Amino acid sequence: MAGTSGFLSNGPVPWMDDTEMNNLYRDLELGTVMTLFYSKKSQRPERRTFQVKLETRTIIWTRSTDKIEGEIDIREIKEIRPGQKSRDFERYVEDSAVRLDNFCFVILYGTEFRLKSLSLAATSDEEMSMWVKGLKWLRDDTLKSPTPLQIERWLRKQFYAADRNREDRISYKDLKNMLSQVNYKVPNMRFIKDKLPDSETRNGDVTFSQFAQLYRNLMFDAQKNVSADILCSPIALPLLRSPAEAHFIPHLCDFQSFLVECQKELWASDNNKVQEFMFSYLKDPLREVEDPYFHPEEFLTYLFSKENTIWDSSLDMVCAENMNNPLSHYWISSSHNTYLTGDQFASESSLEAYARCLRMGCRCIELDCWDGPDSMPVIYHGHTLTTKIKFNDVLNTIKDHAFVTSEYPIILSIEDHCSIVQQRNMATQFKKVFGDMLLTKAVDMAADGLPSPNQLKKKILIKHKKLAEGSAYEEVPTATPYSENDISNSIKNGILYLEDPINHVKTGAPDGSFLVRESETFVGDYTLSFW
């Protein structure tokens, strides 16, 4: 496979030598039999053979050798979670006693915020470790792969999906259906035949090399003048060997000049680095010579690739020296209604939403707390049909995922609708679950400003309205047991706001009566109307 020559790896892996890596590749390609736990309640766990296809960087599972039941693109894997931490395992509690936790793992994948899960039970701890370690490395390596290699893998994945008989050939009809699936409208079969090269045609079938060439034709025909327009512009024209070269093919020195003079790429001043960069795009190993060159399609691939992004990748890493200012000096990645997986009216509240936000880098997340059963709050979007999740479950999820992506502080924004009793229970659980991670006192008593992110590393902060001294709830002593919904045993000192419109309604009630109605100004509070 010429397109992948020399680029199966993007450098050494610190925790894995070449021998171990090759053995891991071999074992994952051979595959193992594991138990698959389905998301549907109607389907019981079943044994399947799981394998990794390195050529396409996919995980496949099969019931038998001739039929693929499912597959996952390794690029879409967001998390590999050891243990039985998914709902799929919870649905089958009858065999949980004999199902060892250290044999199980969950693959979370997808392109949407709400991820899909693949819950698996291996036959041994060694087998589970092999899959977890191997998939983590493969995911990182796949995402770092150069653009041409990613394109090559995607093309092979699409081709093999259409090649159901595994003959290394597909029909024109299969090709037409495949193009329609990627939103490319084909007017008729003649259109495909005209675009395909004549070589290697047999019995009207299409080989992979023809398929790859068709991709290049469709992608670059409409843009065939782009490279000439760019390189023949007033800025780039002096870089050409000859202004008459309308079919310009940039060699090493031309491409280097383009990078330095037009793109202002500082790294390109090193001739060896530019040469190595070009090698990663060349499909023919025979052109890995001292003076490499690009075909127009290869140059266009560079222009539209991630390697040509305007973003400076060196800024992906946070510099610790820049994190010593007060916390209020920074923009903080925040999430609103963190618990929701959909709309604010009837969607599902989920623990996975908290895990996903934290792993995506959010440092401020929201908890909407309402009185729940057993004197413990629940979290949901109040006065709606959204589902409820337990307060304690949310705290444990936050603890598990808080500092996986970043060690900088987490801010819990509390929207509190709870009674005093349940607020006290909340405070107790905050301390019990988070322990030393919870910030309960000032970092520096002598400081005249907020602490810095560096001072708050691996700390959890609570953002909550604090009642001013003298305006807090004061419980009236009573021998009667307190009811969580009974506010008759507490007195609140505060300000009565005259904010809502006055209702001029004659009720016939005697003077001194009053009406309680829901406030339109302060949602969740009440308005008193007197007469």
Image (cartoon, rainbow, N blue to C red):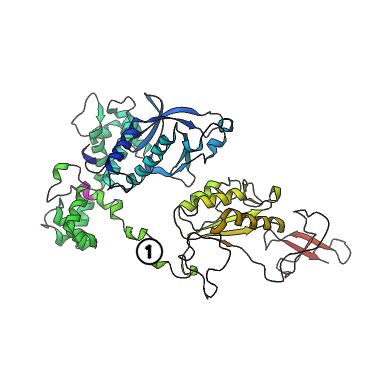
Pick the front one: 219 or 512: 512
Q: Which quadrant: the C terminus?
A: bottom right
Mostly what secondary structure, the magenta segment? loop
Choose top left, top right, bottom left or bottom right for residue 516: bottom right
Indicate the position of residue 28 as horizontal and vertical percent values: 35, 34
Q: Is 495 left, or right, of 49 in this rendering?
A: right
Q: Is residue 337 above or below residue 64?
A: below
Asked whether residue 54 is in view, the answer is no
**Local crowd size for mark 1, using a 10 Å CA cut-off: few (<14), some (14–19), many (≥20):** few
Q: Is residue 526 above or below residue 55?
A: below
Magenta part of the protein: which range?
290-299
Question: Mark 1 sits on what residue?
Answer: 319
Q: Is 456 left, or right, of 521 in this rendering?
A: left
Residue type at the position of mark 1: Cys
Q: Is residue 294 magenta?
A: yes
Indicate the position of residue 191 as horizontal and vertical percent values: 27, 34
Asked whether residue 182 is in view, the answer is yes
